[in-house]
Amino acid sequence: MNRIQSKVCMSHESSRNWSILILCTGYGNETLRSLVARAVSKLGFEVHVYDSAGYPVDTQVHSHEACVRAIDQHDIVLAFGDERQGGTFAHGACTPEGLHWLKTHGVFNPDRDIVTPTVFQVEVLTAKALNKPVLVFVPRTVESMVAQTIKLLRDGALKLQKRKHNKSKTTLRKLVDASAWLELARSYEVSSGHVDSFQHIAFLEKLRKEASNFISYYDATNTAALEDAIVGRLVETAVYFIHEHLHMVSDRVERKRNPVGEASLQDLIKGGLIMDPPCEIASGKKLATQLYRTSRRKGGEIADLLARKKNVLLLGNPGLGKTTASLLSYQDISAKLASHVAAVVPMYASWKDFSVLPLEADDFLRAMIALPRNRSPWPKGLQLRTIFRSVEA
């Protein structure tokens, strides 16, 4: 698993298309997968399923580990869960580095976890560990099954068998009252009705309660509504990628080097060696603070102006600090807006990032969304109305 990365991809090489990986709990979902793949492809995404053409296969490792490695090569994950939990993850066949990655990222630890997760569960948890947008869809019939089982547990109507290797000192009642379903699944054998296992129920319930990427429930008989739900969730993911501009700028600050030295811009900031560039105000009021903020002083005149929706133009010869001022001002305004209630997300770009500058606002925004990941512009099949409202808020 040494190829798995959690950093934002940054490069000036030719951009790739946006890609989506479809995950299911096992075989028998061919109709659903085909429907979803067609719907997503029409929007302009490159779509992969584990048995489709173009799926990145690593023949040097076990198929289960290969599925986990493939996740990092996709931008968005669509996960479809149902009453079946799918096959158990073959952790014994993983390479040492692959198993180490799963342990250190909190996906699965065979030394600690009594119950081995399924392939589907490991894939979803890996995608989350890699900070991928994970959009989970579950039939409403399964939602009802999960809710019914949990109600029976709360009412004390299910008889549970303690697992042989259960070393937990927490009582069953406390686990139920705390809604600690995953720990309960590790400690007890629980009847799960029409769902394959209580472990699967606990996993779906965990996904439902997490702070981001909530589950979407759908009517399996209404394919048009499912397509609409998928489109709606994909529209929302654009904001996720806009937030990656902050990581992109941080990476540029780390990599930017002094032309006559080895120290990075970040090294100079930490050493307090950033000096205010020589400048004068060509228009507007006199500066009330410094141009931008560093770790050793407060300020941020550029960020203050931009936050008040003022235009700022920096002019000067090469090497006088225009790029430095832009990068540090972006970090400044990001920190400033993070504490605001208004849903405003700043973005950053250099003229050098564009081989051709988009002239229409919609095209420009789509190119900006794609910039941190070095992708082609955000697909035209997805509307940007909600994003424009966020930007203009």
Image (tube, rainbow, N blue to C red):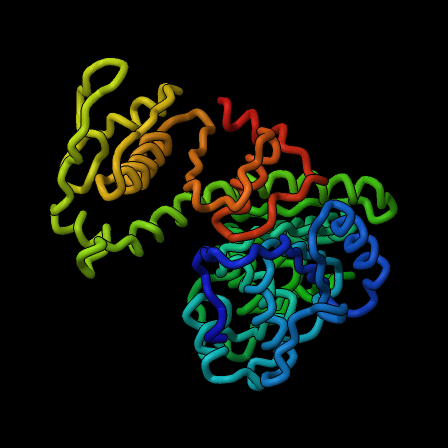
**Residue 62, placed above or below residue 244:** below
Can you see residue 156? no
Q: In the rendering, at what x and y percent does residue 342 appear?
A: 44, 25
Residue at image position (47%, 61%) is: 171
Marks counted in the figure total 0
**Residue 339, placed above or below residue 263:** above
Can you see residue 253? yes
Lateral position of residue 345 relative to residue 365, left or right: left
Residue at image position (22%, 30%) is: 291
Between 27 and 131, which is closer to the camera in this rendering? 131
Lateral position of residue 250 relative to residue 89, left or right: left
Query: Residue 201 occupies which quadrant of the picture?
Result: bottom right
Query: Residue 52 occupies which quadrant of the picture?
Result: bottom right
Between 387 and 340, which is closer to the camera in this rendering? 387
Between 314 and 108, which is closer to the camera in this rendering? 314
Q: In the rendering, at what x and y percent does residue 184 appear?
A: 55, 63
Residue at image position (50%, 44%) is: 354
Residue at image position (66%, 43%) is: 379
Query: Residue 226 occupies which quadrant of the picture?
Result: top right
Q: In the rendering, at what x and y percent does residue 183 appear?
A: 51, 63
Considering every residue shown, the one lying at the far front of the view is 317
Q: In the rendering, at what x and y percent does residue 203 appear?
A: 60, 59
